[in-house]
Amino acid sequence: MPNIVCNIVEVCIFSFDNKEPLYLMLRRSKSEKIYPDAWQIVTGSIELGETALHGALRELKEETGYDPQKFWIVPHVNSFYSVKDDTLHHTVIFAAQVSPKTNPVLSEEHYQFGWYPISAAKSMCVWTGQIQALDIVHEFIIGGKSAAKLSEIPL
């Protein structure tokens, strides 16, 4: 029977150019052992004793230098199976709105970034779960549905 763990967080970062939402995509360094050169949203591990929320805020800061203007829990859990260690991973997903017309300060984990409209950002994703997360952020949080108010986390 596979192990089931929840020790990874992901953060969909967006900003606005006028009224158009743009999503930050990061390109993993070519020297990374796992998924080198792949485009992704912020992704990282929760440290021992850390909550998913604090892990997401820490990863956001470490990978981009951003402090969010607003922050939400995304009503979606990304899941994937690793055959290497027979583990089913559940990933908690957050969304962060950051100041417009600012650029991230990348960590060594990434070497390239870009701000993209939803369709372009989704086309760059390798993983279905990240595409679904972007869709949910776009429709429910940016779209202003009830989920946006109910899932916003006061900072």
Image (cartoon, rainbow, N blue to C red):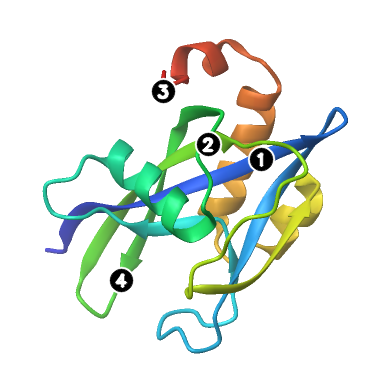
Q: Are marks 2 and 1 in contact (CB under 8 Å)?
A: yes
Amino acid type at image mark 1: Phe
Closer mark to the observer between disc 2 and disc 4: 2
Closer mark to the observer between disc 4 and disc 3: 3
For label 2, the residue is 95
Residue at left 28%, top 76%? 83
The CA span between labels 4 and 3 is: 34 Å
Residue at left 62%, top 24%? 140
For the C terminus, the image quarter is top left
Count of marks overlaid on the render:
4
| Residue 124 placement (x, y as % from top left) | 70, 64
Closer mark to the observer between disc 4 and disc 1: 1
Q: Which of 22 and 123 is in front in this view?
A: 22
Q: Earlier in the sequence, mark 2 or mark 1?
A: 1
Q: Which of marks 2 and 4 is nearer the N terminus?
A: 4
Q: Is mark 4 on a helix, strand or loop?
A: strand
Sort mark 4 into few (<14), some (14-19) or many (20+) by Cα contacts within 10 Å. few
The CA span between labels 3 and 2 is: 13 Å
Q: Earlier in the sequence, mark 4 or mark 3?
A: 4
Specify the quadrant of the image occupied by residue 143: top right
For label 1, the residue is 14
Q: Earlier in the sequence, mark 1 or mark 3?
A: 1
Closer mark to the observer between disc 3 and disc 2: 3
For label 4, the residue is 82
Q: Nearer the viewer, residue 29 or 88?
A: 29
Amino acid type at image mark 2: Ala
The CA span between labels 4 and 1 is: 29 Å
The CA span between labels 2 and 1 is: 8 Å
The CA span between labels 1 and 3 is: 17 Å
For label 3, the residue is 155
